[in-house]
Image (tube, grey):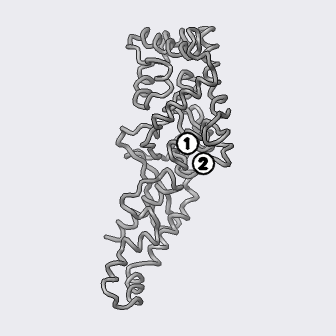
Amino acid sequence: MIRITKFYSQNELERYYDYILSQNSRFLKSNGLGIFIVNLLNEILEKQGKPKMVEDFKNLLTMSFVELKRLHDSININSTVFKDIVEDVGNAKKLKTYRNYYKRFFTSTYTYSESKMKKNNISLIQDLGITVCPYCNRNYINSRDDKSGCEFDHYYNKRDFPFFSLTLSNLIPSCSTCNRIKKEKSYNFCPFEVESNKEFNFKVSPPSISSKIELYFGDESQKDNVLKLEDAYEIHKKDVAEMFMKEEKYCKEYRDYLISLLGDKGNIGNEFSEEFFDSMIFGEVSNDSFDDYLNHSLSKLKKDTYDYIVELREK
C-alpha cells in the first residue's frame, strides 16, 4: 500500500553483507554456496539466451529492486532449461540449504557496537526508519526490548525463487498478518518499487447504513486484493465516521464563534486560520505535505478521508 522510498543505507548494506558472511565463512570459497548460487543464476540466464546479470554474491544480496525485478523478469521458470537445472538432485539440495538459511539469519543474533545482542531484522528495520507495515498501513512492526523484530515477506516466493531468499530488496518488512495471508501468492505491488506511478487510494463516504471503504490501486478496484485489505479496513468505518463527526461539530460557524470569543485582538482572526483549526482537529494528515505514512498507523485512510472532507467543504 505504501512505498518505501528510502532503501537501505550503504553502511547497512555493508553490515548485512558482512553479517551473512560471518554466519557462513564458506559462502565465498571456490565451492561455497554463495558462489554456487551466483553461477547457477547466470547459467540459467545463459542457457535461456540472456546475458549474465549477477556480478557476484554481494551484488545478489544487496541489489536494488529495479535490478531484482529485471533479473526476475528475465528468468522463465516454466522453461525446460530452468526445470532441468533447479530439479537436478545436487542443485536442488543446495538450493534448499540456501533457502533455509533465511530463518537462521533472520532470527539469530549478532554482536553490535552499541548493543551486545540485536537481531539482524531489527537492524534492518531501524535503518529504513519505518514502524508501520507497508502492506496494510495498519499494524506496527517495531521491535520490543531488542529481542524481537518484524517479519519479512519474500515478494518473490522462496519456493519458485530460492536464489532470492536472502536478497534484501526481495524481503519486505511486514506485519505477521500480511505475511501469513500473502504466503507464496503473487502480488502486483512491491513497496520497494518506487518507479511506478500507480498508488493506493481510499474512497470513503459520509456515515450511513450503506457507507463503505473502498480501496483502489490506480484505477483498479482492490475488492479481491490478495491481502484482503478491504476486509481488514471494514472495522475502520468508525474512524472515518469520527472524522466526519468532527467536521460537522467544528464547522465554520463554530470556528467563527471561537474566534469571536477571543475578542478584537489585532489580527487574531488571521492567526486562527482554517489550516490551524484543521491541524488541531484532524492532526498531521491535514498538512498538504504529509507523507510519513510508514510511521503512522491508518494514516493513508485518514489522509484520503481528510482530503475528501475538504473537497465536500469547498463545494
Residue at 49% from the left image edge and 23% from the top image edge: 58
Q: Position of residue 6 (x, y in %)?
A: 43, 42
The quarter holding residue 220 reads top left
- For the residue pair 302 and 11, the one nearer the viewer reads as 11
Q: Is residue 41 visible?
A: yes
Crowding at dot 1, Cα within 10 Å, few <14 / some 14-19 / many 20+, comes out as many
Seen at 59% across and 13% down, the residue is 32
**Residue 87 seen by the camera:** no
Of marks 1 and 2, which one's residue comes earlier in the chain? 1
What residue appears at the point 56 percent right and 15 percent down from the top-left corner? 28
Above or below 1: residue 24: above
In the image, which disc is placed on residue 77?
Answer: none
Specify the label residue 142 is tagged with: 2
Crowding at mark 2 (Cα within 10 Å: few <14, some 14-19, many 20+): many
Q: What type is the residue that disc 2 sits on?
A: Asn
Vertical relation: 117 (above or below) 208: above
Residues 168 and 226: in front is: 168
- Kind of element beneath mark 2: loop
Q: Position of residue 49 (x, y in %)?
A: 38, 10
